[in-house]
């Protein structure tokens, strides 16, 4: 009962922050609302027995990506959006978004959850440590994606430096 | 809390992100709405990982976060380079390829 109430409160804050992200005129307000959404999501990850993911969410998303976005907004000195939003874009956007939501809920309602059932339980997470479990999975079964991700980060760093230079 | 509630919430956040991408004109706010969509999918992955008792969903979320970080760096560098040319990051001004 109490868990349901807590979930509803955090979910309401997350949805409200998401709506603020898409409607604020000032991009800094959008960025701050997105940070609030990330914190709500980190709370959900803790409720779903994934504490390492919650920590990574706060560190990487709210701590690195959003800081980068706020830096860029302040570097380019982007002011609040002036002028009216064109009405036909709002209407078509609303229809498409509602269509996506309707389709997702329809498939959610008529589907059953299937898939490989593993042995991850809450007791295992508490006993062995979530970090160790993810580390074991990444370094044994998912080693190739891990190495490719490191290459991807290298490419991203070089790309970001080259794109933002004055003269190449 | 049933898994159904998490999936519905994820669908709601994903559709809000979709609306944001289609409505906004500021390129950085569009990018923030894309990040919102990615996070909605992350929530789906972790909810289903708990439901099935499988660690694979959470490992995938790990890689999605890494890719999102790389994409943030490159995308923002692209916007800075565009701003140097055009003095605006309104997507209405990105019209060189328009017929």
Image (spheres, rainbow, N blue to C red):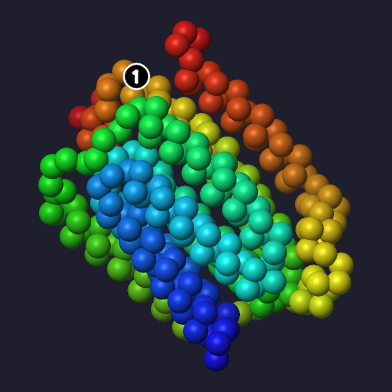
Residue found at x 75% / y 44%:
A146
Left/right placement of residue B25 relative to residue B56 reads left
Question: Residue B53's x, y, as percent?
Answer: 74, 75
Q: Residue at x 61, y 47 (%)?
A: A60
Rendered-image quadrant of the C terminus of chain B: top left
Residue at image point 33% right, 43% down: A27
| Rendered location of residue A93, percent (x, y) | 25, 57
Chain of the residue under the numbered disc 1 shown in the image: B
Most foreground residue, A46 or B66: A46
* Residue A81: percent from left, percent from top: 22, 41
- Please tell me which residue lies in front, A93 or A59: A59
Q: Is residue A18 left or right of residue A125?
A: left
**B62 relative position to A14: left or right:** right
Q: Is residue B64 visible?
A: no
Q: Is residue A141 above or below residue B70?
A: below
Q: How many marks?
A: 1
Q: Quadrant of residue A77?
A: top left
In the shown orientation, is residue B49 left or right of residue A2? Answer: right
Element type at marker 1? helix
Asked if residue A21 shows in the view, the reply is: yes
Q: Which residue is mark 1?
A: B84
Residue at image coords 73%, 46%: A145
């Amino acid at each position: 009962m109490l868990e349901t109430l807590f979930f509803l409160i955090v979910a309401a804050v997350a949805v409200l922050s998401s709506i603020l992200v898409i409607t604020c005129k000032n991009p800094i307000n959008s960025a701050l609302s997105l940070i609030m959404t990330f914190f709500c999501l980190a709370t959900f990850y803790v409720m779903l027995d994934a504490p390492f993911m919650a920590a990574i969410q706060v560190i990487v998303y709210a701590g690195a990506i959003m800081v980068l976005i706020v830096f860029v907004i302040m570097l380019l000195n982007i002011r609040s959006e002036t002028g009216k939003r064109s009405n036909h874009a709002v209407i078509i956007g609303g229809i498409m978004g509602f269509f996506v939501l309707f389709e997702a809920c329809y498939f959610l309602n008529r589907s059953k959850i299937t898939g490989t059932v593993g042995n991850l339980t809450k007791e295992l997470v508490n006993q062995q440590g979530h970090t160790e479990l993810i580390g074991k999975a990444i370094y044994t079964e998912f080693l190739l994606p891990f190495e490719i991700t490191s290459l991807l980060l290298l490419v991203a760093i070089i790309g970001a430096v080259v794109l933002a230079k004055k003269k190449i | 809390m049933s898994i159904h509630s998490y999936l519905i919430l994820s669908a709601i956040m994903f559709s809000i992100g979709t609306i944001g991408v289609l409505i906004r004109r500021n390129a950085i706010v569009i990018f923030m709405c894309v990040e919102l969509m990615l996070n909605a999918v992350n929530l789906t992955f972790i909810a289903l990982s708990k439901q099935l008792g499988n660690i694979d969903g959470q490992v995938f979320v790990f890689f999605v976060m890494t890719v999102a970080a790389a994409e943030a760096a490159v995308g923002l560098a692209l916007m800075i380079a565009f701003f140097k040319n055009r003095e605006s990051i309104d997507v209405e001004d990105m019209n060189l390829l328009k017929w």
